[in-house]
Amino acid sequence: MNNFNCPIPHYQEDVITLSHGSGGKQTSDLIENIFLSPFSSEEIKKMHDAAFIPSIGRSIAFTTDSFVVDPIFFPGGDIGTLAITGSANDLAVCGARPIYMSSAFIIEEGFLQSDLKKIVASMHQAALSQGIQIIAGDTKIIERSTGKNIFINTTGIGVHMVDVLPEPYRIADGDLIIISGDVGRHGMAIMAKRNDLQFANPLYSDCAPIFPMIENLLENHVELHCMRDITRGGLATSLVELSELSSKHFIIDEELIPIAKEVESACEILGIDPLFVACEGRFVLFTPPKYKQQVLDILHSFETSKNACVIGHVDVRKSPSAVLCNSYGIERPLYKLYTEQLPRIC
Amino acid sequence: MKFVNEYRDPSLVRLLAEKIKKTAKKNWTIMEVCGGQTHSIVRSGLNKLLPDNIQLIHGPGCPVCVTPIDLIDMAIAIALTPNTILCSFGDMLRVPGSSFDLIKAKALGADVRIILSPIDAVHIAKKNPNKEVVLFAVGFETTAPTNGMTIKMANDLKVVNFSLLSSHVLVPPAIKYIMSDPESKVDGFLAAGHVCTVTGYKQYHELAKATDTPIIITGFEPVDIMQGISLCVDMLEKQETGVKNQYSRVVKESGNRQAQELISDVFTVVDRHWRGIGSIPSSGLDLSSKYKTFDATYRFTIKTDAPSLDSGCLSGMIMQGKCKPSDCPHFGKKCTPQTPLGAPMVSTEGACSAYYLYCDKGSS
């Protein structure tokens, strides 16, 4: 009789299976082995169905966001950093200090546990560095498609730092429009990584918390009429949205918009307009002209906003729109990104 | 950016605008052939720097816009065929077919891949030997060599599951066609610099003679375009015809011989239907009989319904310079980038999208 050779398949790495989402022993093991230690807030440790939040005594800001970025690891960050920082930045531009967050994961079976650990470690690091406690969480496992997908939802709570909140309706005629840094890094870093594009000067995401700068501005009593973090749709979309919400007319000087050389070159090659490319660590703010120098001095004292500059102003004209004035003195209206920018034929 | 910023220099652009103003005594209508030039003009507002007696009209040089609707329908049908991957440049995905576009086909389950280089399609075919991989090859003479290269590569590497759906078009027959129309308003042309990088411009001498117009081979940056217009106006005022090469830093009279040989080897010249315009003799490239097995129309038996053409889109008129996007009653109303009636509203080289994105709606 022949010797049957029936080797047991051996996989080097542990992967997520549907059992990890069953709600039973393997779910508990996953939570204990991967989530519990990094997300070690007192509320999480209780393993109760809901977290209790002590009375804060001020009004709170509340936001939620879902993160589906592909690739999940990219130069300058990963989906974990993005999930914490993205929601924290949304709170920050509302004048709120991010303090609590929940995190919910949807993971495909076959996803590497080692990758999940890296993502959770990034979330832990991002939360810790911003003084955020992760106090609630959830994990669901879905059937395999590519085995590489993970989606994260974070919901954040922040406490307001000021009584008069920065909101679009407060944008006033004459306000200066200041941007905290160069635009387009995150979107182009993702596009380069996704398409395996090699550039002589590599592109890194600008994914970073913006609360430290905003905290400093608020503590120094700068009058901030409105702020917005620039994410999907890029700077142009943010400006058009704010002009519509405030019913104000913005004039932007195209030459003043900071764009890193490597981003500008990559956009030029691919036929992409950098004004519509996503950022993950930049914001625009609206402030009266008398605060110009103070704002710039504060922003320049932080590494991530060292290139902050004035890019335009709110004009007295009544038509609610954002227009771009180019170096030839010609104005053209900005518009909201209506679909994903796609590389062109030639 | 070196070699780019020099050609966007505001002082040079203003200087050229002044020169054009001084030179232009009569009314002249100049057509920029390429959609890339149209976008550069409208985005930078160069048309607003010109005197009133110089009119720019926009030509047919948007390959996405002129791809016939039945070919788009065929690409969609191929994409929806099981075990098939359709590779395309991003521009083509939003172009409306008779019923829907490739983006919707993707959402319906078609495997549509956006590529940055045609060669990527051959690599995808190599990696997926059990699937048919089709490259939707669209473009003018500019992209024909790289698309042709994929056929040579697939042939050499024996990648038998690769094929090409060709919709290549040629510029000179289109210029001739426009000028054969007695209603044509065109006095002079800015020819597409990148097309001439491949083809050279020897045949443009004859074209200029036949059409009795000045033809300026022109680049794409604001300084290039203003210089092209200046040269064209100068020739018009002197009643000269002929060819001048503004884009001499890139274009040589003989063009790129290697690319031309590749085109001759892989493709054969055929009559082509231009969307919105009609059939233009000897204005397209199909795969030559030598490479018939790589022709997707030969490999796939696709029956599509007769294309629905009555969308109300005036793209044909616009691409022949007979009207401007803002003259169309649907512009910015029924027809927007989200709800396009025709390809010029979605292509990054389409005149309608340039007007929609960069002008006050309804203005020129």
Image (cartoon, helix red, strand yellow):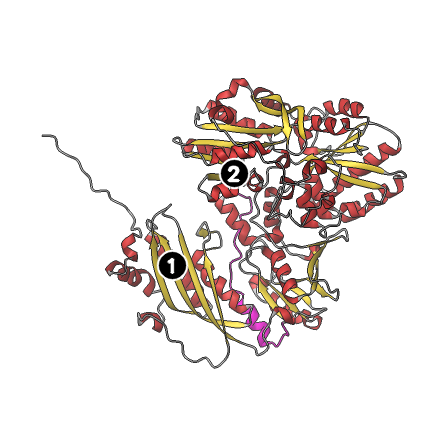
Q: Is residue B325 above or below residue B234?
A: below
Residue pushed farthest right? Answer: B25
Query: Measured from the top left, where is residue B290 in percent x and y?
Result: 52, 17
Marks 1 and 2, Cα distance to the nearest angstrom?
Answer: 31 Å
Which residue, given by chain and number where applicable, does mark 2 sit on? B115
Query: Who is closer to the viewer here, B144 or B260?
Result: B144
Residue B89: quadrant of the picture: top right
Residue A336: quadrant of the picture: bottom right
Q: Chain of mark 1?
A: A
Q: What span is in magenta?
A: A198-224
Q: Chain of mark 2?
A: B
Q: Is residue A51 above or below residue A337?
A: below
Q: Main secondary structure of the magenta part?
A: loop
Which residue, given by chain and number where applicable, does mark 1 sit on? A105
Query: Measured from the top left, where is residue B272 in percent x and y?
Result: 63, 26
* Numbered-mark total: 2
Residue pushed farthest left? Answer: A1
Q: Is residue B274 above or below residue B102?
A: above
